[in-house]
Image (tube, rainbow, N blue to C red):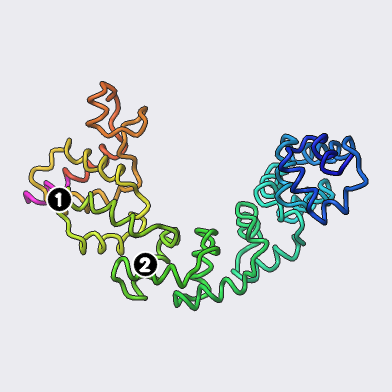
């Protein structure tokens, strides 16, 4: 029986078996095992991490070296170094199987030193984003500081806020933001520092979405870009969310307040949901049409108070 046939008998799909049978590391390490022994190997790893054997087979196919680890030892090491539960350790390893092969004492030390984080901060970040373990974090920090003109503290803050920030091509990010919004290096860097997730957006798409908002509120392109620069988090909101927020404004007694005044009032509560509770993100108008309007959106009550105060000040 060929090794490929043994793997097929052990539960691997034909495609998986063919891929593993052609992998030098896996073949050399396991070619003398029979199907039962390979099944036991997959079963043992599955028990260690608390998952189905099919998931372990999938991981091994994509990363054959995973089959060579002492998984009991790996899990124990991760738990001890990062002071985490078995569930947290397993999740990190299964998310990034290469994580199982690192020297975690060294990883934690390097991450702490690179970003000036406490052991708790470094552990939390590495566990939630295990790809950190494979980065040259000193180099990552150096590149970020150079591209955006930030201090060590600013770069570390961005990484702490949004760990995926480490994976971006920052020269390309900065160039793209500047071109789309017409900003200077300083303005683009300021926006990204204020909201590091901003670096990951398709900014042409962001402007297309906000153009709909602009048409409703009679805001020009420059006004929209200015608002994004002031509050970059606005780029994370969908057009649907903006339109639902506008719908809230339609049902308030604004007593002639300008669109800009309403928008400025909304900015204070932008994080509050404009959708009708108990629905699948329906605006007030759509909920009324479906006879499904029982509770005001969380944004509504807060905006009502803010608008009433604005109207009083206007009258005074």
> Please, which residue is most extreme toward the front here?
1
Residue that carries the numbered disc 2 in the rendered image: 177
Q: Is residue 62 magenta?
A: no
Magenta span of residues:
309-316
Dominant secondary structure of the residues highlighted in magenta in the image: helix
Residue at 83% x, 46% y: name it. 72
- Residue 61 x %, y %: 73, 47
Give the structural element (helix, strand or loop) at label 1. helix
Q: Residue 201 appears in which quarter of the rendering? A: bottom left
Query: What is the quadrant of residue 149 in the picture?
Result: bottom left
Label 1 CA crowd tier, 10 Å (few <14, some 14–19, many 20+):
some
Assess whether residue 314 is covered by the magenta stretch.
yes
Q: Is residue 48 above or below residue 74?
A: above
Name the residue at 73% across, 43% down.
16
Q: What residue is rendered at 88% in x and 52% in y? A: 29
Q: CA distance from mark 2 to mark 1?
A: 27 Å
Classify mark 2: helix, strand or loop.
helix
Q: Of the two numbered discs 2 and 1 on the same chain, state the one appearing first in sequence.
A: 2
- Left or right: 30 as drawn, with respect to 82: right
Locate residue 126, reporting x and y percent.
Answer: 64, 57
From the viewer's perspective, is 17 left or right of 175?
Answer: right
Which quarter of the picture shows residue 189?
bottom left
**Residue reaching furthest right?**
32
Residue 276 picture location, percent across and down: 31, 32
Q: Which mark is residue 259?
A: 1
Give the residue displayed 61% in from the left and 59% down from the top. Answer: 121
Q: Residue 41 appears at what percent x and percent y?
A: 85, 41
Label 2 crowd bin: few (<14), some (14–19), many (20+), radius 10 Å: many
Residue 288 higher or lower than 29, as above or below:
above
């Amino acid at each position: 029986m060929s090794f490929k046939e043994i793997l097929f008998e052990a539960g691997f799909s034909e495609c998986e078996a063919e891929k593993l049978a052609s992998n030098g590391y896996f073949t050399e390490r396991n070619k003398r095992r029979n199907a039962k022994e390979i099944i036991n190997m997959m079963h043992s790893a599955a028990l260690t991490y608390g998952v189905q054997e099919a998931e372990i087979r999938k991981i091994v196919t994509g990363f054959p070296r995973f089959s060579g680890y002492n998984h009991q030892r790996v899990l124990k090491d991760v738990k001890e170094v990062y002071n985490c539960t078995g569930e947290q350790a397993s999740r990190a390893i299964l998310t990034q199987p290469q994580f199982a092969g690192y020297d975690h004492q060294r990883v934690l030390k390097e991450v702490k030193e690179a970003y000036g984080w406490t052991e708790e901060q470094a552990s939390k970040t590495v566990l939630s984003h295990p790809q950190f373990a494979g980065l040259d974090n000193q180099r990552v920090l150096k590149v970020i500081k150079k591209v955006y003109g930030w201090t060590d503290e600013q770069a570390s803050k961005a990484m702490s806020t949004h760990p995926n920030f480490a994976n971006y091509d920052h020269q390309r990010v900065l160039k793209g933001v500047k071109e789309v919004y017409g900003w200077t290096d300083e303005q683009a860097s300021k926006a990204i520092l204020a909201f590091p997730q901003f670096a990951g957006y398709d900014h042409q798409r962001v402007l297309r979405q906000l153009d709909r908002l602009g048409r409703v509120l009679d805001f020009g392109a420059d006004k929209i870009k200015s608002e994004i620069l002031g509050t970059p988090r606005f780029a994370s909101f969908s057009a649907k969310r903006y339109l639902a927020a506008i719908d809230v404004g339609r049902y308030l007694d604004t007593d002639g307040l300008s669109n800009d005044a309403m928008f400025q009032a909304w900015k204070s509560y932008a994080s509050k949901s404009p959708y009708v509770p108990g629905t699948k993100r329906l605006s007030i108008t759509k909920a009324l049409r479906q006879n499904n309007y029982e509770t005001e959106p969380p944004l509504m009550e807060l905006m009502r108070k803010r608008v009433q105060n604005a109207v009083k000040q206007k009258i005074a």
